[in-house]
Image (spheres, rainbow, N blue to C red):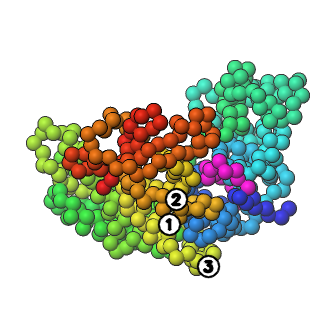
Amino acid sequence: MTARIIDLGELRRDETFPAYAAILAPAVDNPFVLSPAAMRWSDDIHLNRLTDCRQFWQAQKKKLRVKLTELFDTLLKQGYGDDYLAVFGRHPWQCLLYLYYQRQHGGRGLFLLQSPLDQNIYRSLNWEQWFAPQQVLAEHWQALAPRGFTLDQFRARQARLQRFIERIGVAGPAAMAGANENSMTRRFDRWLGRIWRWTLQQDSDLALFPWRQYQQPSLPSVERDLEYPVNQWQYIALLLREDFARLAQLLPRDDSTHVNRICWQITLFNYRRIEVEISFRHPYCPHRDAPDFDTALYQLRYLYDDLMRELCARESDLDLPEAMPFVGWKLDIRERMQLTPQLWDLFGQDVDSVDYRRIQELQNKLPLAFESYRFHASFFPEDSFAPVPIGTPDDEQLESLAWVASAINKPLFFYRDVIPIPCPQRLQKIFLERNSNQWWLDGDALHSIRDYYLLRDRRGRCSWVYRDADGAWFKQGEFS
């Protein structure tokens, strides 16, 4: 059978980024191609949790101007050859079921379980295909030894369920979709009830799923013992910059290793040890950050300030310095992602004038995540925009210029929830506009009308307020 790629365009609008992937390949040299969170399911199958690097892959998709499936397909071929089989979906168990089905039917390539086509095929799975992956699942449960699980009892419950199925004569799990987890648990046991939930539910609930993450290979770390205590950030930063240079020397210089988490183990002047952790929003390459390592130092500075505030508040009754001195620390890479060095050249040169790498570096430096919004066609301010994933294209059917022009008399600061205020009788009010929104959908069109004013108080501060059809007043924003 020839390789087949399902286009992400087949997703419904309410679908999200796939959370997991199950990959079948003859040899798995690098299970961390797609994510630092990976699990070995069997000799030739492993799982990846993609949510750990969702923003990174969405940014690469936008940067390279390719479909997500095209990007993943190329990476998987680079890592495993043309003979791989991969299923992407919401839950690892659903990915495994569909992977077993496609292997049985000789499938090759990349399948997106959230697409309507593959959903229809998934609903046609028979009982033999549903029971087959449970053998390995039971072995994982036996190895983890969760409370209440015994292999013999589980197999006995499976046999009981099989006899029940033969008696009622249903073709597959989809034919019993009316049964829920509670009914399966009462009739059989909690383990089969949980498998039933994983099979049919549209969520990523991992309760009782035997996720056994790959142990990361030995990762480099650097340690520093100070000859004298240091408590000023400018001096700590100089030493940390040297340590990051040492850490970068211990990593491959081919852009293959990207760091997701770094642990900073600090030894205080009283020899108390504290651990803080940097979690990068996008995989971080120390070589690209050299020689200043500003991205890492920005994150460490935020952690340092938070730690000092916490320690001073906790031990305020003691006579301690405002910034507690350090006598040593250790930088330890806890999680990394092994990207193919050819990733940046797979699709040729960038065709976009936007420097996405600089944007990712900026996101790694900032203490808060970026937010992206898009216009909606609405005259009510609270409905006129909505958050969207970063990189989402503009709605071509929306004339955004007209809506931007309508915002000229609106403030920059906007309250998420309007604030009721008393009638401003003795304050200066300047009428701005009257608007309404979709009045034809309301039984009472008058209640959709709002009169907006600029309200100036005695100190000259200007607020954005409106009066509704009932004469009630509300504050919705502030002018600078």
Residue, disc 1: 257
Image-quadrant location for residue 194: top right
Relative depth, front residue between 414 and 139 = 414
> Crowdedness of circle 2 by 10 Å Cα count: few (<14), some, many (20+)?
some
Residue type at mark 1 is: Thr
| Residue at horizontal 26 percent and vertical 50 percent from the top | 461
Q: Is residue 272 left or right of residue 399?
A: left
Which of 233/417 is in front?
A: 417
Question: Pointers 2 and 3 in contact (CB under 8 A)?
Answer: no
Magenta part of the protein: which range?
Answer: 10-27
Front: mark 2 or 3: 2
Lateral position of residue 237 relative to residue 92, left or right: left
Residue 433 coordinates in the image, percent (x, y): 44, 50
Q: Secondary structure at mark 1?
A: strand
Q: Residues within 10 Å of mark 3 (few under 14, many from 20)?
A: few
Helix, strand or loop: magenta stretch: loop
* Residue at the bottom extreme, as displayed: 349
- Identity, as a three-letter code, of the amino acid under mark 3: Gly
Q: Earlier in the sequence, mark 3 or mark 1?
A: 1
Estimate the x, y position of residue 19 in percent, counting from the top left: 61, 49
Q: Which residue is mark 3?
A: 348
x%, y% of residue 161? 79, 26
Dot 2 amino acid type = Trp
Q: Which numbered dot is residue 403?
A: 2
How far apart marks 3 and 1 lie (CA) works out to: 21 Å
